[in-house]
Image (spheres, grey):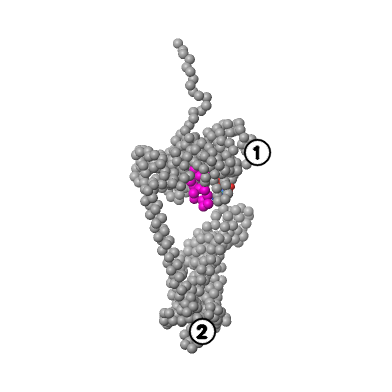
Amino acid sequence: MTYFRGVIFFMEKLVPAKERLLKSQKNWMNGEVRGKIIVFICAIIMISATIAITIFLGTKGLQSFIKNGVSLIEFLTGKQWNPSDQAKPQYGALPFIFGSFTVTFLAALIAAPLGIGGAIFMTEIAPSWGRKILQPVIELLVGIPSVVYGFIGLTVLVPFIRVHFGGLGFSLLSGMIVLSIMILPTITTIATDAMSSLPKTLREGSYALGATRWQTIRKVLIPAAIPSLLTAIVLGMARAFGEALAVQMVIGNVKTMPHSILDASGTLTTIITLNMGYTTFGSPENNILWSMGLLLLIMSFAFILLIRYLSSRRKI
Amino acid sequence: MVTEMKDYTPNIEVQKENILNVNNLEIFYGEKRAVNGISMDIEENTITALIGPSGCGKSTFLRSINRMNDLIPGAFAKGEIIYEGLNILSNNINVGALRKEIGMVFQKPNPFPKSIYENITHALKFSGLKKKSQLNEIVEESLTKAALWDEVKDRLHESALSLSGGQQQRLCIARTIAMKPTVMLLDEPSSALDPISNAKVEELIVELKNDYSIVIVTHNMQQASRISDKTAFFLNGDLVEFDQTEKIFTNPSVKKTEEYISGRFG
Ligand SMILES: Nc1ncnc2c1ncn2[C@@H]1O[C@H](COP(=O)(O)OP(=O)(O)O)[C@@H](O)[C@H]1O
Ligand SMILES: [Mg+2]
């Protein structure tokens, strides 16, 4: 059998270098270009969808400030929420902004140590059986729909808190517990990936210097993985910030500022989902909900920027 | 009657054809120049060794010969490398086709996480070779040439990652051979291997000289003097001296070369 150097395309005859090595129309029309076009189209669709949503949300969300004359300061700092009042509508969204942030941070406060601890357990302490047990648990947690989380929270958690801690039961505390369980898989999964992608040589380097397992984890592995671990936490927080359904079922959805962790509260997302059905499109009450949506979008951009910043610090 | 036969054999070695002509090659990483305008001719069926201290630009030069530096953002080359009458640095080169003719083996064995068999057929398949019988034939032929056939012929469908480091490296050489290249570029191919694997790879490289033109980067002076025909000494991006290996190692013309070879720096 004869086939010639490198160029298996041209099996029978040796083709001059010019035809073998120069880019030609034929090369142009082969899979290379087709692949490029497909990928390009995918990218363009994604980009235009994102841009379209952003523009739509931007224009809708700014209506209340431009057309309806709502003051941005009032929106961001006012505590009175009464958009449907005919005589004197009030648009203070601070209680919801506060509610969103508080419940998100509290949820992260619980889920981050749990998730990172679980990740360390799976990768460092018991990589064989620990992973075998925890991995399916986490996958299961991801698969449960938010309405089920909310339902369990509503029937188990809310009465439990009412009985044992006082208050209505519908509270920041319930919201934060439900959310923390919901974002746990996100944090655990990303943290596990981060820990297990650390090079083996790093561990060996530390052990070879006589470090114990715990010293290695604390002084070498966690610091090396910290940017990815922070990314995991921020991604979990972004998810918590945007979650509406489950939170809405347990948090109480009041318009007032919570004063303790046992007080009921509202969040940007819950107010949007609760009110969007009752307001007419284009009305000031409706527009202000779009403004809240825009605020959520801006926050998610902020989360993304934060993630980017954190992961860029990786390159040390 | 005895007539005196005239000896026509020239004293100097028979001049081999040049396979690559490098003219005034400069290579940059962004602002930084890593290779400063070197010129050299690389001969056919010859082992050309590139030696020099770390960071002097050997790998950079080697990787420019099959345009691997294209993969590094910000890297670009000036000057020319002529191969078969074409400047392979020019934009209209189909780098895929070029790399099939100018193959490369890396310092760390990098087999694909596939079977031994598939490691060889991988590139053949996407080059359009589909026939099972042909593929089998090439697998055997290239593994044999890479002196690996006897060791793996019973486990062709096992993972390539189950091979030892030395075997993996010979597999990488075999998969390059399977493409029937004209030139093989080897970047410290045995520096990650144990002495026995190293010896095997060296032996293999000398063997391959009959079919291919080989350019090899090595850190190991003994290796360069043992296997190469010509040696190029690089220093800080300059080509300091390029000559017959014997000359370089016994009687170099440049003082720096002598100092490096005798281990006074580097
Ligand atoms: N990807 C890269 N980006 C920027 N500079 C590089 C890169 N690769 C190599 N260099 C620089 O180019 C010079 C030559 O490197 P290299 O060719 O790898 O040296 P050698 O192989 O001789 O040890 C070095 O100074 C190195 O720092
Ligand atoms: Mg190198």
Q: In the image, is residue A132 above or below residue A13?
A: below
Callouts 2 and 1 close, C-beta under 8 Å: no
The location of residue B109, given as percent across then percent down, is 50, 46
Type of amino acid at the residue the image marks with label 2: Gln
**Residue lying furthest bottom:** A87
User: Which residue bears the numbered disc 2?
Assistant: A90
Q: In the image, is residue B98 above or below residue A150?
A: above
The location of residue A179, given as percent across then percent down, is 50, 73
Q: Nearer the viewer, residue B209 or A154?
A: B209
Left or right: where B144 falls relative to A95: left
Q: Quadrant of the C terminus of chain A?
A: bottom right
Q: Which mark is residue B264?
A: 1
Left or right: where A128 falls relative to A37: right
**Residue lying furthest top:** B1
The location of residue B65, given as percent across then percent down, is 49, 43
Question: Is disc 1 on the same chain as disc 2?
Answer: no
> What residue appears at the point 34 percent right and 39 percent down from the top-left corner?
A12
Q: Nearer the viewer, residue B108 or A79?
A: A79
**What chain letter is assigned to the residue under label 2?**
A
> What residue appears at the point 55 percent right and 72 percent down from the top-left corner?
A105
The magenta span reads: B61-76
Q: Which mark is residue B129?
A: none
**What chain letter is assigned to the residue under label 1?**
B
